[in-house]
């Protein structure tokens, strides 16, 4: 198992206001004791090859790999032309992923937004069609598309179309490719969707190729039932806080047991740092200890379910 880091607490500075360049983050990350850095498409302020090569050289010089790229396509947009543009943008991000991460890197996909006028079956058709259309490019580049059980991208108006576990699994089942497509599992997003993270993992473990690790804490005196909405989801309630991995609501003992039993020994990226770099470092320390305990100290990147189809 290899550990990557993703600076969730810096998203506004790096993506929205663009006051913190990716090169600064790369240097800061040297202190974390991780193996790789997950990037966000918004961290890349230019798209030219020379700029991407500068980013790649900085990552390598700092002793890291770039195994995962975070992208947020909206494949369920009701406008056909906009869906086509989303596919083209995703293709551009895939090429950047390959240039920075090389063979085996993953580029995240999402289904899209839960646009009110889009019925479930229609959205499933559009999302599956868009993802399937990109698989030949993934094969050409030697990378994978990994769909995350997500809640809501920061720039979106509506939550994730496939937030509900049954809709998510229905979409995954429509895409049979197990060589260039898989699942990026996020246990905290399962909580936000109103599901049990370990039980949700059991339903998708056969397709998991990467993992984002984080943790959530409830405000004192609050329960998940207090936050549950009419549709059963929790959402990004202000009473549900980010914090150090292993000290919150996620049962990582159960989660790691499921993953190890299924032969998962791949990348786990820390989605943390909302409360500062110190908490991100503490989360990295937790995962290093978990690697020793659950994965026998392995720094391999092996996923049994993926290897079985190659």
Image: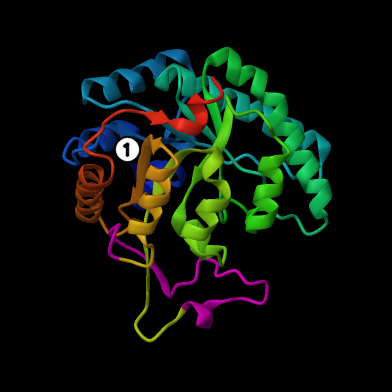
Q: Horizontal and vertical percent for residue 59?
A: 29, 25
Type of secondary structure dominating the magenta stretch: loop
Q: Quadrant of residue 43?
A: top left
Number of numbered discs on residues: 1
| Residue 220, visible in the rendered structure | yes
Describe residue 202's horizontal placement relative to residue 66 as left or right: right
Describe residue 206's horizontal placement relative to residue 284 as left or right: right
Q: Horizontal and vertical percent for residue 217?
A: 36, 70
Tag 1, which secondary structure? strand
Which residue is found at the position 21% from the left and 33% from the top? Answer: 27
Compared to residue 237, the image places residue 268 above or below, namely above
Which residue is found at the position 46% from the left and 14% from the top? Answer: 49
Q: Horizontal and vertical percent for residue 121?
A: 82, 50
- What is the quadrant of the C terminus in the image? top right
Which residue is found at the position 51% from the left and 52% from the top? Answer: 201
Q: Is residue 143 magenta?
A: no
Compared to residue 173, the image places residue 154 above or below, namely below
Describe residue 124's horizontal placement relative to residue 163 as left or right: right
Q: Residues within 10 Å of mark 1 (few under 14, many from 20)?
A: many
Q: Is residue 231 magenta?
A: yes
**For the magenta stretch, what is the residue range?**
224-247
The residue nearer to you, when weighing 154 against 261, is 261
The residue nearer to you, when weighing 298 against 145, is 298
| Residue 154, visible in the rendered structure | no
Q: Horizontal and vertical percent for residue 199?
A: 52, 59
Q: Residue furthest left?
A: 31
Compared to residue 143, the image places residue 14 above or below, namely below
The residue nearer to you, when weighing 116 against 248, is 248
Residue position for label 1: 4
């Amino acid at each position: 198992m290899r550990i990557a880091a993703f600076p969730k607490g810096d998203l506004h500075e790096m993506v929205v206001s663009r006051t913190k360049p990716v090169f600064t983050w790369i240097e800061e990350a040297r202190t974390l004791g991780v193996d790789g850095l997950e990037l966000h498409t918004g961290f890349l302020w230019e798209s030219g090859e020379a700029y991407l090569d500068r980013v790649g050289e900085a990552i390598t010089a700092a002793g890291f790999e770039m195994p995962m790229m975070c992208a947020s396509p909206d494949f369920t947009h009701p406008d056909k032309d906009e869906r086509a543009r989303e596919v083209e943008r995703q293709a551009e991000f895939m090429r950047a992923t390959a240039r920075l991460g090389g063979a085996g890197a993953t580029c995240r996909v999402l289904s899209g937004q839960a646009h009110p006028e889009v019925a479930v079956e229609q959205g499933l058709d559009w999302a599956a069609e868009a993802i399937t259309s990109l698989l030949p490019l993934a094969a050409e580049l030697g990378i994978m598309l990994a769909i995350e059980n997500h809640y809501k991208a920061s720039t979106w108006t509506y939550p994730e179309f496939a937030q509900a576990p049954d809709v998510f699994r229905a979409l995954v089942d429509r895409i049979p490719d197990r060589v260039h497509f898989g699942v990026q599992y996020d246990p905290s997003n399962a909580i936000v969707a109103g599901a049990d993270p370990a039980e949700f993992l059991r339903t998708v473990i056969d397709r998991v190729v990467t993992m984002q690790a984080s943790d959530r804490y409830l405000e004192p005196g609050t329960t998940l039932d207090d936050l549950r909405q009419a549709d059963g989801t929790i959402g990004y309630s202000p009473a549900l806080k980010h914090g150090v991995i292993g000290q919150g609501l996620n049962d990582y003992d159960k989660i790691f047991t499921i993953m190890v039993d299924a032969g998962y020994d791949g990348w786990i990226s820390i989605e943390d740092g909302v409360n500062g770099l110190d908490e991100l470092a503490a989360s990295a320390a937790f995962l290093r200890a978990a690697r020793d305990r659950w994965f026998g100290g392995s720094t391999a990147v092996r996923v049994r379910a993926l290897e079985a189809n190659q």
